[in-house]
Amino acid sequence: MALHKFKCRYDNFAFEADIDDTETLYSPCPRCGRLANRIVGTFLMPLSMGCDPSFPTMWDKWARVHKQQTKLAYRHKRATGDIR
């Protein structure tokens, strides 16, 4: 079973429901009983699940490449005498 989010447009009530069929677009609202639309969105991971600090992110990659490029530019300037 998959957990999907739904929102009733009549009373603005948002709720989650366990649905077997992944193609289901409507579910009955627990408040008013009318059909509520399924909300399709991105997956959110709560920070309480934790994260692995050793996992490299795009920011880490950018910082590493930027640092390497800065070192190379400094060495090139020093070798050509262009340092002021």
Image (cartoon, rainbow, N blue to C red):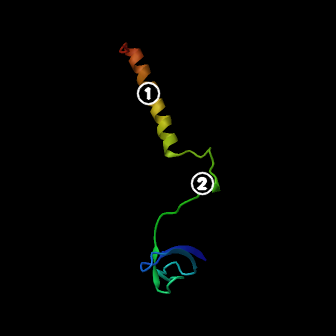
Image quarter of the N terminus: bottom right
Residue on which disc 1 sits: 70
| Residue at horizontal 46 percent and vertical 66 percent from the top | 41
Taking depth in this image into account, of 25 and 76 the one nearest to the observer is 25
The residue mark sitting in front, 2 or 1, is 2
Whole-angstrom CA distance, mark 2 to mark 1, is 34 Å
Task: Examine the rendered structure and indicate whether residue 20 appears above or below residue 83.
Answer: below
Residue 56 image point, x, y percent: 56, 44
The amino acid pointed to by label 1 is Thr
Residue at 49% across, 85% down: 32
Q: Is residue 49 left or right of residue 26?
A: right
Circle nearer the N terminus (2, 1): 2
Tell me: residue 48, above or below residue 35: above
Amino acid carrying label 2: it is: Leu
Residue that carries the numbered disc 2 in the rendered image = 47
Circle 1 SS class: helix
**Measured from the top left, where is residue 83 in percent x and y?**
38, 15
The quadrant the C terminus occupies is: top left
* Closer-to-camera residue (80/59): 59
Q: Helix or strand or loop: what does disc 2 sit on?
A: helix
Horizontal and vertical percent position of residue 72: 44, 25
